[in-house]
Amino acid sequence: MIPVNELARGFKLYQKEYEDRAVEVLRSGWYVLGKQMTSFEDEFAAKLGEGAICAGVDNGLDAITLGLMASGIGQGDEIIVQANGYIATMLGVMQCNAVPVFVEPDEYYQLDAAKIEEAITPRTKAVLVTHLYGQATRMDPIVKICNDRGLMLFEDCAQSHFAAYKGVNTGLFGKASFFSFYPTKNLGAFGDAGAVISKDPEVIEKVKVLRNYGSDRRYHNIKIGFNMRLDEMQAGLLRVRLSHMDELIANRCHIADRYLKEMHNPKIELPLVAEGCDHTWYQFIVRADDQEGFMAYMKEKDIATDISWRTPPYLQPCMQEEFGSGEGDHPITEELCAHIVTLPMMEYMDEDEITRVIEAVNGY
Ligand SMILES: Cc1ncc(COP(=O)(O)O)c(C=O)c1O
């Protein structure tokens, strides 16, 4: 069976480097808030682009929570998010006692800028863009709306490490941006990890205080904080992966290139890439009229598929209970969830595997 993703492949690619780094961390005698973390913060920020400052945290959800809090988001603030986004984005908003307001996606599966205005109310504080599936969102119209309407702009970059819009990496457009390094991500750790990026030193300083019990120095607590720290082992291993990021993304682009050039089946709609938007192919999403039938057919061909995700966040039971949301609220999103299928995309697929996926799709 060709899996949708297989994490051990990514490990084996640079096994010796990972193992050496793990031993280095183990022998260092320092496991939390140390040199691996600060080095990773510096290296990640430097690679993202000019002005970026980084605070490492324990996962992507907490990056959202801490980054929003540190930017002043709080009780009752409305934050515009995309209806087909991942639930963690909304949970981060809700951890700040703010309210997610759902807006439909465009044909690239990204937040539809044309639909933002109608969602703005006097309580709207910010737009939180999620660059979904590895593709950068078209930012110009969103930046303009935020500037014109006095809204803050945030980015959830959990799926878009180093995907650029018009040459600028995602994560550098707004007040703060949030990264997950969950193991499946293009920049993935070997456990949970995340980061907040901002060009505003004050936001990053606040995140650093909040992530460490609210303390600005040892045994001195100025905020009601959390324990949301990035540990040395994950930071050290992330530095290895970060050093290979360009080749890892290039490899995903090669797989996607072959899929896009060689898949020809009118029953399967291939993903669109917007002009000026890099796609780093965190996931390769197609659309099929008969989602279940196509997935069953692929399984017969010994190829795994998945759905990211079958139920939109606002239809999850907890969200329906919280907001009274229900079926039919966002028809574009619901139509999408009923038809999208994730094809295999991972760190190193050999050419035969890529060919098998293409031939299976073409034979459907
Ligand atoms: C878009 C998006 N936001 C946030 C998260 C949450 O990240 P984490 O799993 O590290 O908490 C994820 C993924 O897991 C994600 O895909």
Image (tube, grey):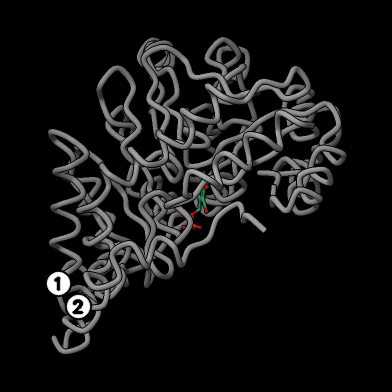
Q: Residue placed at 69% from the left, 50% from the top?
A: 303
| Whether residue 354 is visible | yes
Query: Mark on residue 217?
Result: 1
Residue 198 drawn at (x, y percent): 25, 41
Q: Amino acid at mark 1?
A: Arg
Q: Amino acid at mark 2?
A: Asp
In the picture, residue 36 is in which quadrant? bottom left
Q: Quadrant of the N terminus?
A: bottom right
Relative vertical location of residue 11 with respect to residue 129 in this rendering, above or below: below
In 3D space, how far apart are the residues under numbered discs 1 and 2 (Cα atoms)? 32 Å
Relative vertical location of residue 275 with respect to residue 360 in this rendering, above or below: above
Q: Nearer the viewer, residue 170 or 272?
A: 272
Q: Secondary structure at mark 2?
A: helix
Q: Nearer the viewer, residue 362 or 268?
A: 362
Earlier-in-chain disc, 1 versus 2:
2
In the picture, residue 307 is in which quadrant? top right
Query: Mark on residue 20?
Result: 2
Relative vertical location of residue 201 with respect to residue 60 in this rendering, above or below: above
Q: Residue placed at 25% from the left, 25% from the top?
A: 168
The reply, left or right, for residue 268 in relation to residue 75 is right
